[in-house]
Amino acid sequence: MDLSALILADSRFPGGGHVHSGGMEEVVSRRLVTSVRDLPGFLSGRLRTAGFLTAVFAAASAHAAVTGGNWSILDSELDARTPSLAQREASRAQGRGTARAGRIAWPSPVLDTLLAETPRPHHPVIVGALVGVAGGSPYDAAMAAAYLAVSGPASAVVRLLGLDPFAVNAVVARLDLGTVASEAAAVAGDDPASLPSPGSPALDLFAEAHARHHQEEVRLFAS
């Protein structure tokens, strides 16, 4: 795995991921996840839906960073596949934070062009572009995005429920990230309009509910 992908997947990278729970806070508040036993189902489901979607667009973005591509089209295609306004806003907020840190770490005319076309890019788009600019492959970008899709909720549940971090990380380690990343990388060069569009209606509904609750009461995470 390319070093840039490892850095981007690191929770210490200042991209703002620490304020997002990937739906976990809302799920915990509804008592749908109460222990480590509940995590495999939630995390594997998230990986195969929202995680696969982010991996696909990160891989496509890494490909576009090398071959040249229309960033606004790539970003708008991901927007169209994200029906929840709360999810779109969370993705763009994290994308903005990642872009700020990424431009310092890997300055490039490619990034300048991307941010000129899409000043608030979706998070997978900027992650993939940064990996591509740094010399990583679409697979590397997909792996970083897939890992972030499950590591964020996993870290959040430790804070929310006080679960054993060793047991939680064991669940993450057993997830099939490699298959998801491989499938995403396989379509990296396809027309953005034809990229996969896996749906996750429950996560969309949880995100919208969390956004409403966030306005009414103090929540630990923004999403």
Image (cartoon, grey):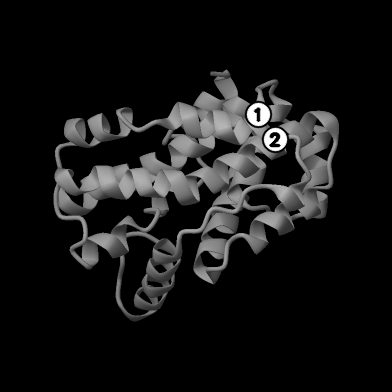
Task: Work out whether 56 lies above or below 133.
Answer: below
186 and 19: which is toward the camera:
186
Task: Work out whether 125 lies above or below 120.
Answer: above
- The C terminus - image quarter: bottom left
Bin the neighbour count of mark 2 within 10 Å (Cα to Cα): few under 14, some 14-19, many 20 and up: many
At a point 58% along the width and 26% down the height, the residue shown is 140
**Residue 163 picture location, percent across and down:** 15, 43
At a point 16% along the width and 43% down the height, the residue shown is 36
The mark that comes first in sequence, 2 or 1, is: 1
- Residue at mark 2 to residue at mark 1: CA–CA distance: 7 Å
98 and 124: which is toward the camera:
124
Q: Is residue 94 visible?
A: yes
Residue 188, label in figure: 2
Is residue 81 toward the left or the right of residue 33 in the image?
A: right
Is residue 117 toward the left or the right of residue 102 in the image?
A: right
Residue marked by disc 1: 138
At a point 81% along the width and 36% down the height, the residue shown is 110
**Residue 3 picture location, percent across and down:** 56, 19
Image quarter of residue 129: top right
Tell whether label 1 touches label 2 (CB within 8 Å): yes
**Residue 167 picture location, percent across and down:** 17, 33
97 and 134: which is toward the camera:
134
Is residue 65 toward the left or the right of residue 141 in the image?
A: right
**At numbered mark 1, what does the secondary structure look like: helix, strand or loop?**
helix
- Tally of numbered tags: 2
Q: Amino acid at mark 2?
A: Ala
